[in-house]
Amino acid sequence: MLTSLIPLTPLGTESRRLLHGRGGNFEGLEHVAIDWFAPVILVTLYGAKESNARLIAELVEFSKSRPEVTALVVQERHLSKGPKETVYGELPPETIATESGLNYHLSLDRNQNHGFFLDMKPGRDWIHANASGKRVLNLFSYTCSLSVAAIAGGAESVVNLDMASGALTTGRKNHQLNFDPDTCQRASYLSHDLFKSWGRLVRGAPYDIIIIDPPSNQGRSFKAENHYPKILRRLPELLTADSQILACLNAPHLDESFLTDLFADYQNQGRLPCAPGFEDHDPAAALKCLLFTK
Ligand SMILES: C[S@@+](CC[C@H](N)C(=O)[O-])C[C@H]1O[C@@H](n2cnc3c(N)ncnc32)[C@H](O)[C@@H]1O
C-alpha cells in the first residue's frame, strides 16, 4: 500500500515531501513524488505507468480519510506542459507553502512548476542563518525563496536575477507576503539573461554572498557543462576576499566533482545536507549545494 508510506500523524502546516520515489528507495515508485502543501496533497508523476490509476485511487481514499486534506492535485510532468488536475476536493482560493515560519505563493492550478522547490530547504536554512548584515546576490532566483530566507535572516540587501519575469513577479509577492514595505525594499529584481547582464552585476559588486542555483539544462539559456564555467570565469569581478559562494547543481548526470573541479581555486567548505524527505539511493545524483570561499 502506497499510503502506508505516509505518516499516520496529522500532516501539520509545514510544507514537505511525503514520498520521494525519484530517490530510488521505493521500488515501483521511481516516477512518483508526493508533496504536502497544507491543505493540499500534490502528486507529481514523471511517467505514464499502468499503476498510476490505482495509485491515484488509493491517494483519493487516503485524502478522504484525513480532515486536514481538502484537495488532491495530480501533475503529469511527463506530458507536454505538465498539466495539473484536481482529482479530489477543491483547491483553496490561494495555496501557500510554509517553511520555517516563512510563506511562499504557490500556483497549484497552473501547469509547469508551482513556484517552490522543497529540496532547497537546506539552502534556505543556510542563508537564513548566515545572511545577517550581508549583501547577497541570488543568481537564477526563480520566485526568490532564497531571498526571502536571506532577508528574514537579516540580509542588508539581496539582488535577485532571473530571466523569467513572471517568476520575479511572484518573487516580489513572496517578499510582500512576509515583510513590511520597508523591509521589502532590501530586495531588488533584475529580469535578465545572466550572460547578457554581467555589466549590471559588476556595477552592484562586491557581494558578500553569491548564490548560484541554475537549472541543469534549459534550452539555449543554460547547460551546466557550457555555462557554469562561464560564470566561474567572471565570478572574481563580483567578490571580496571574504565572499562566500553557495554553488548548486541539480543535474543527476553530474556529480559533486563537477563543482569541485570548477571551484578548484576556491576553498571547499563542504556540502549542505540533503533536504528531509529527499534521501536518494545515489547521493551523487541528488541536488548538490556546496559552499566555497576564496
Ligand atoms: C532551478 S531554478 C532556480 C530555483 C531557485 N533558486 C529557488 O530556490 O527557488 C532555475 C532558474 O534559472 C532561470 N534561468 C535559466 N537560464 C537563465 C539565464 N541564462 N539567465 C537568467 N536566468 C536563467 C530560470 O528562469 C529558472 O527560474
Image: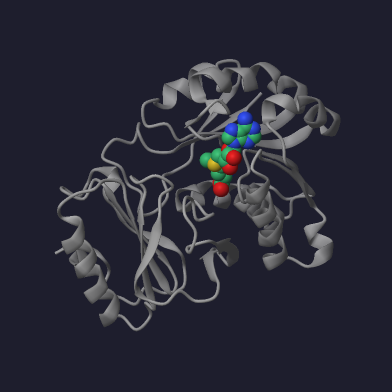
Q: Does residue 251 show up? A: yes
Please state, as top left, top right, bottom left or bottom right, where the N terminus lies in the image. bottom left
Q: Examine the image and state in which quarter residue 200 appears.
A: top right
Q: Examine the image and state in which quarter residue 193 appears.
A: top right
Q: Residue at x 50, y 17 (%)?
A: 261
In the image: residue 120, left or right of residue 2 = right
Q: Nearer the viewer, residue 23 or 200?
A: 200
Q: Residue at x 61, y 51 (%)?
A: 143
Give the farthest residue toward the front. Answer: 80
Residue 246: image x %, image y %? 59, 36
Q: Nearer the viewer, residue 59 or 286?
A: 59
Q: Residue at x 43, y 38 (%)?
A: 287
Residue 161: image x %, image y %? 70, 39
Q: Does residue 240 show up? A: no
Please state, as top left, top right, bottom left or bottom right, where the C terminus lies in the image. top right
In the image: residue 63, left or right of residue 93 = left
Q: Examine the image and state in which quarter residue 23 appears.
A: top left
Give the farthest residue toward the bottom. Answer: 67
- Location of ligand 1 given as a quarter of the image: top right
**Quick check: 267 above or below 154?**
above
Residue 61: image x %, image y %? 22, 76
Residue 84: image x %, image y %? 40, 59
Q: Residue at x 51, y 25 (%)?
A: 223
In the image: residue 95, left or right of residue 57 = right
Identify the colour scheme used.
one colour
